[in-house]
Image (tube, coloured by chain):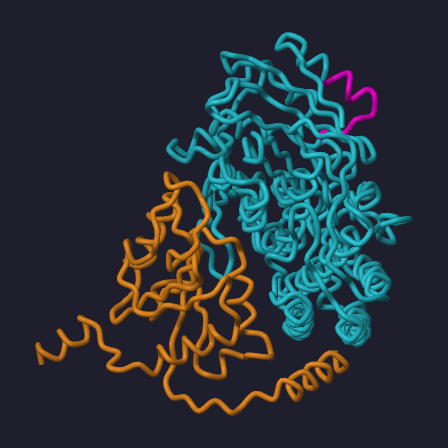
Chain colours: A orange, B cyan
Amino acid sequence: MFVLLRQLRRVRRDADLPPARTRGSLALRHVDAGSCNGCEHELQAVANPYYDLQQYGLDIVASPRHADVLLVTGAITTRMVGPLRAAYEAMPEPRRVAALGDCALGCGVLGAAAELAGPLEKILPVAARIPGCPPSPDRIAEELIALMRASPWEGPARSARRRSR
Amino acid sequence: MIHRPVAADGWRAAVGEALAEGWRFAGLHATREDATPALLTVLTRGSDALVLRCRAPERRVASLVDLVPAAAWDEREAHDLHGWSLPGHDPLRPLVDHDVPADAWTAPLVGRDAYRVAVGPIHAGVIESGHFRFAVVGERVLHIDVRLFHKHRGLEAAAEGHRHTEAIRYAQRACAADAVTNAVAYAQACEAATGLVAVPAVARARTLLLELERLYNHVNDISAICAGVGFAAGTMLFTALKERAQRLNAALTGHRFLFDAVQVGGSRLELDAQAVGAARAELDALRAEVARGRRELAFAGSLQERMVGIGRVSAGEVVMLGGVGPSARAAGVAIDARTASPQLAYDGFAPAAPTVPTGDVAARFELRGIELGATFELLDRLLDAPLAPAACVGGAAGDGLGVAVVESPRGQSLCVVELDGDRVGRLHLRTGSYANWPLVALAGRDALLPDFPLVNKSFELCYACVDR
């Protein structure tokens, strides 16, 4: 165990990450709507010690009910439209949708037209676009941090509350 | 390759005879909609392939499922996607077709205190989409019904009509984690169909790419199993090592998943002396780190004790269901397509075996580690000289049908290509994940429900290349 931890400490030293100068946080929920699994691998990779997404206040949560951002990968198969909408409906306001990878963005998608309902913006309002096939982990981290800093981060629910006061 | 037409009434007899002669079932698929309706069974023996083609204008032929239980998913797919009826396959549960009530595709559940737990298609982690119905009593799993194909993109149909040299992207994009395997299988199938043979330089380049793919996948799988038991130090170390392996991929080919590094008819991979030297040095360093990490994990009681006896499948079950890859080898079934790949640089390769082939999570975990050792050996040998682009040469004339089997990190991937001139008439891909999913459902039986993620991670199958 101590050897493992020592190895990890060395990895951290080699990675030499700059200190995270961010405030706030974003909770992310991922939905795979027909990817090749490449975007999932890279989204997992942003949690590895070389990128450490969590130090910026970004984390992947288990339920859309706890999420600020819906990260969608894949070409949006007809079979995933229903689950995708259900996940979006379950999210509290304010909420944002991010298209992760070229397939979700509708670039160079491979597949039969009858099986696909994408790109994502035909189905949900897309606030952030992260291109790449798949996008590299540093690109994903960079775009998500930019999304977190983007202001105002206000959705209809919060502004409605303010008006009622 | 032997390509033999079979009459519909002699279909079962022909397959039965081939099995008796020692051929092993490798896949079954239907021809495309507008072609003469036929079912094709591919069998392999060593590096030979036998294709039995059964023409049946009415799309109706007796099921093989009692002779070859491994053909169950293939037949269900032929029914759902291509409209075949297969008398004898009863119940023929929907596999790809999702517009059906739940009791059409799940096993009936009766009895006191038995209930179902539905999971997915969206999962709690960053995982691909797929749906499971667990039949449980308390926490004990009685039975699992797996419903995949949420990610069905129609890749095989979409590839039809494209020039065969370009349609390689359909095979490659079926799955990022096995992109090289599927692309090499596709390229070899096209080359067999057009009468081309790989020269040693092409074989060497492809083998190098295949082993680089295996390296980052096996490292990833070790990390995933650690995650399955919540052993964070192991998870993090091996994700860091996977990152290094993927950075090496990018340095050698310009892509972290080795996309577009395989071509039909040759190899464009070019590595000078400096590049191979740097890669060898990095691989040496990685090898030492992996060995150190593995040694520590071997003594981590909280990991080891959670893996023993969990998710067990016997050698008999593996053979019956047609399991392949590390999962099969961990149960004592020594099949590895690398022993029968004359078009690749695997001379003298022998399949790895665990200390005791218990077929549980512990054996699958151990096997990944042992195989990593062989992969490092192979990579070191393959990188001992610079690599230059090369083209395949003409061999025996092809007849427009090509079959290839290539070992992926998850087991052998079969690719069948039928060409119309230089266009793809039919592409069929049956990956290691496809072959192994029925085994996952079996392995999860009798486990505790919270252990299923661990069982699943120990197979670490892909959904994308099953759904296609």
Q: Position of residue B174 (x, y in %)?
A: 55, 48
Q: Eyeballing the image, is B283 above or below B365?
A: below
The vertical placement of A35 against B73, above or below, is below
Q: Report the magenta residues as a range.
A: B15-25
Q: Residue furthest right?
A: B348
Q: Is residue B299 visible?
A: no
User: Foreground residue, A38 or A65?
Assistant: A38
| Farthest-out residue, top | B9
Q: Tell me what residue is drawn at x 37 percent, y 33 percent.
A: B99
Q: Is residue A43 magenta?
A: no
Nearest the camera: B411 or B386?
B386
Corner quadrant of residue B257 = bottom right
Q: Quadrant of residue B229?
A: bottom right
Quadrant for the N terminus of chain B, please: top right
Q: Is residue B287 left or right of residue A133?
A: right
Residue B294: image location, x then y, percent? 79, 69
Q: Residue B420's spot in the image, x, y percent?
A: 56, 29
- Residue that appears at 15% across and 76% down: A159
Please indicate whether residue B157 sits to the left or right of residue A65 in the image: right
Q: Nearer the viewer, residue A51 or B367?
A: A51
The number of callouts visible is: 0
Q: Position of residue B172 (x, y in %)?
A: 58, 50
Question: Is residue B24 within the magenta segment?
Answer: yes
- Direction left: furthest residue: A164
Visible residue check, residue B398: yes
Kindly identify the residue that appears in the image at 42 percent across and 64 percent down: A100
